[in-house]
Amino acid sequence: MTHEEARDAMALFVVDADDAPTRRALREHLDGCPECRTELAELTLATDALARVVPQVTPRAELRARTLGAVTGTTGAPAIALPPRPGRDVVGRAEPTPSPATRPVGRARWLPLAAGVVAAVSAAGWWQTRAEVAELRATLATWEARVVEAERRAADSQRTLVRYEQRQELLTADDVQLVTLDGVPPAARARGRAFVSAARRAILFTARDLPALPDGRTYQLWAIAGGQAISAGIFVPDRLGNTQVEAAVPALVDRAEAVAVTVEPAGGVPAPTGPKYLIGAATE
């Protein structure tokens, strides 16, 4: 708790209008802050003197008579209105002797602090409202974050749905070709399959057991059609050597004759230059 927060909390502390967490925080601050302890002591004196700073006024005798008549049910003014005796008020109580806290000089000193206490009590509701607003803002921020996350998941789901639809269109295309690829040393264990559709200008390719490549090298997928090798993009298998590629191939306008995978420099090349690791002929 800072000095400013402690000063705000003191006014509520002296009239027992604070809450338990604020009171604990204030006490912890006071343990290490002599300046705030002194200010709290002065504010406590001001609160104690608050009831005595209002000037004492002795009511007139006729006001006393009317009040007693209203209480007892009698009417009319009393026969004799006695003035108050010296040193006594109209109801027979001794007038209090002014204490140092109620003398004009003392009153002038404590009035600003007393006014601060009154203002603090009035502000207690404002502090509560501010806390409620802060809580509402935190709740709103939480829900906004949830909405953002939900929108992100919805976008991911939409992209996944689009891929499934495209895959379904490819697999059900009238001209779809299934190509089985076999590994070539040093990837003799590797196997692959490709679904090729010239009408859809697309290839769906899967492979397994491809060996890891050194840095600066990548796998590149090719469709052989019309006597030309058409790039279907580069890919990197996972740590088990497995991969799945869904590639749009705009240049694929003729039915495929074969599908191959070569090892090329990172970033790929426009025409195959490296060794073949997978190759397979298309079937009618």
Image (cartoon, rainbow, N blue to C red):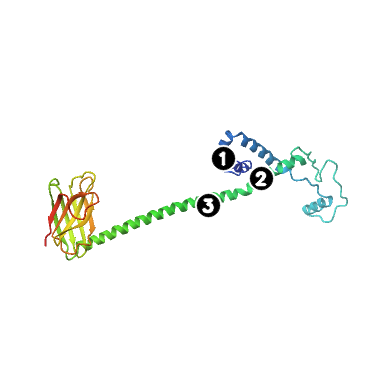
Q: Which mark, by number, is residue 133? A: 3
Badge 1, how many Cα within 10 Å: few under 14, some, many 20+? few
Q: What residue type is labelled 2?
A: Gly
Asked which quadrant contains residue 109, the reply is top right
Q: What residue type is labelled 1?
A: Thr
Badge 3, how many Cα within 10 Å: few under 14, some, many 20+? few
- What is the C-alpha distance between the residues marked 3 and 1? 22 Å
Marker count (numbered) = 3
Which one is nearer the viewer's eye here, 256 or 177? 256
Which one is nearer the viewer's eye here, 120 or 83? 120
- What is the C-alpha distance between the residues marked 3 and 2? 24 Å
First reached walking from the N terminus: tag 3 or tag 1: 1
| Image position of 162 (left or right of 118) | left
Q: Where is residue 195 in the image (x, y as percent from the top left)?
A: 18, 59
Q: Residue at x 69, y 40 (%)?
A: 46
Nearest-to-viewer mark from 1 and 2: 1
Which one is nearer the viewer's eye here, 80 or 170? 170
Circle 1 SS class:
loop
Circle 2 SS class:
helix
The residue at which mark 1 appears reads as 2
Q: Mark 3 near mark 1, Cβ–Cβ under 8 Å? A: no
Location of residue 105 with respect to 63 vertically, above or below:
above
The residue at which mark 2 appears reads as 116
